Image (spheres, helix red, strand yellow):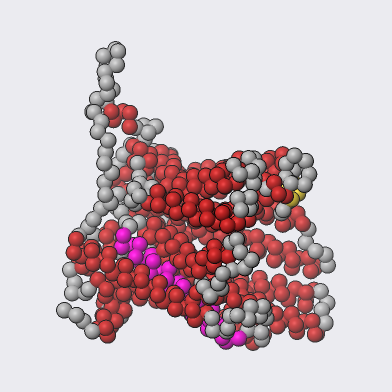
Amino acid sequence: MIRPPHHLLTRGLFGPVFQREVRAVSRRTSSFWVRALYTLGLAVLASIIYFAVTAEIRFGGAGKASALQLLQMFAPTLGAFFAWFQFVIMCFVASTLTAGAICDERRKGSIASLLATPLTPAQIVLGKFAGRLVQLVILIAAGIPLLLAVRLFGGISSEFVLAATVLTISTAMVHASIALAASARVRSSTMAASSGFATGVGLCFAPMLLTLILAIGNNGPRTLSLLPFSPYFSLGWETARSLGSNDMPMFNANSWLYALGYNAAGCIFFLGLAVLRVRKLATGGEWSLPASSPRKRSSVQKTPANGVSKPIAEELTVWNNPLAWREFRQRLFMRPWQPWVVTIGVAFLLAFIYRESGIQSSQVFFVTSAIALALFYFQSALIASNSIAGERESRSLEALLTTPLTARAIIYAKWLGALRRVSPIAVLYFAIAFCFGVIPGTFDWVMLPHLALIVFPPVLFLIATGVWFSVITRRSTVAATLNLALGLMLWVVLPLIVVAGAGILSQFKGSSPPDEIFGVLAVWNPAPMVVTAIQGADWSRAIFGPHPSYNTFFHFSLWSFTACATVFALVYALLARAALHGATRALARRTNRDG
């Protein structure tokens, strides 16, 4: 029986599933914490920008005309920071909100009862989608009054507020729809959240990347008409216009409407995909991943010379830890053909780019490093957060605790398992660095050990903190959010606060802040260290001596930078060990086990 569209919308968007989701999500303690922390973050951001802008007025002795000009710059500056802060945070929050919509029902065993109702799969999907987006709308609405209030200072238009809000909501809806579609396929809410966020970012960056690829090897880009379809470009263009920049007259004031249509098409597509997967659940029941064909092995090894045989189970143990054996046997990909498709696709894309730009081009590797390392750190922060919390959600933690394993054995097995699951990205990245950087002679071979010292230790730290958060929290999505927030706090928010504080204090003293502050912040952050390692190994920048100079954020020689990278690795390794020790003590205390 075909139902009219209005019946689908009323029973889907605002039906019983919607009402249930609104009540269930709103009553969670984490919802109140997210709202409070988000509002607090907005207040802190506004305060830092206000003090940074008005420091010269209060302490620099600026005249009335200069003070008025500085105050007029406060609103556009705060509007730009606020728009991008809300844009990025809401995209991640949207992915985590809908990540457990379907897979949590499957874990609890309540999906069968939900599918037994007269509701269609489309009504179920739309109800869960709309119900969880209510929390997103509440968060966005909490920041709109602040953005409108700063208009009193002048310099920010209502059109910018409208464009930034609409782009944020539509892009967040795309991330939420992708996470919802992934939730109907995978069994872990953390995997659904990571898939939703990573795929959403790739989808939103796709028009810009396609324009960049088409521009390689030419005097100029072949076309610029694809750029407005990217929400990131549209928001950046609206931000530039609000700050008084009109350097690109080929884009009009309403170019962000293209991004809105692009987001709407993506949202409809992934919601339809989610409906098809829920319908497959309803008609075919639970399905599992295809089992890998086991190798035929005899139950007993060949009899050695002394006539005593060993059972094969003794050979399969990993450090006499069955949990570690299970973690190392987990699938890295859902399908066997996926790693081959990804590898071949990346190889063909890089071959095309290097053919157009030249094999000696070093700029391509910078872009590749930024994308690969951002994905590497993001996956590391999320995957480990499903370690203990995922066992608790799937109700297998009790069975795990019946084993004689100590808390230390459980924690380290989960840590090693998460490290193995993120290893394909590292293998792919270092393969690209070796094949397209070292072999052609673009970079010196010393770049590889430098990158190994800089890239891997923060990953060990993020995985360790993810395991720790998974012990002390009840939900894997909460643990993933806390772990990702920790990384952003250490490498983004804390440096901004220190720089802003140093600038304000320098107004009291009447001198500029010392350069050592920026050097310390850069040494702690893996991103500047990676940039320094790549630029220092670039032979086109070689000026002094037989090796290139390491003069970017720092002033290092080859050996001093190697020593700095070694200290960097040791510090993060010690922090990872401390986080694992904290996770072990927390698990031992909560389960009354030996540490």
Number of on-image labels = 0
Please state the horizontal and vertical placement of residue 404, each as a whole percent of the image: 33, 36
Q: Residue at x 27, y 67 (%)?
A: 276
Q: Which residue sits at x=40%, y=49%?
A: 339
Task: Locate the N terminus and report the quarter of the image it occupies.
Answer: bottom left
Can residue 30 be spotted in the picture?
no
Please say whether residue 334 is one of the residues in the magenta stretch.
Answer: no
**Image location of residue 334, percent across then percent down:** 34, 51
Direction from residue 202 to residue 61 in the image, left or right: right
Q: Main secondary structure of the magenta part?
A: helix
Which of the pair 364/575 is nearer the observer? 364
- Where is residue 156? Give x, y as percent: 63, 84
Q: Residue furthest top?
A: 306
The boundaries of the magenta stretch are: 157-185
Question: In the image, what residue occupies the spot 83% across and 82% down?
Answer: 63
Q: Residue most toward the left?
A: 1
Q: Is residue 547 visible?
A: yes
Above or below residue 532? Residue 44 is below
Left or right position of 41 against 314? right
Q: Residue at x 36, y 69 (%)?
A: 270
Pick the quarter of the image with the C terminus.
top left
Q: Position of residue 254 (x, y in %)?
A: 54, 84
In the image, 372 versus 169, the foreground residue is 372
The reply, left or right, for residue 386 in relation to residue 201 is: left
Decide if residue 389 is on the left or right side of residue 238: left
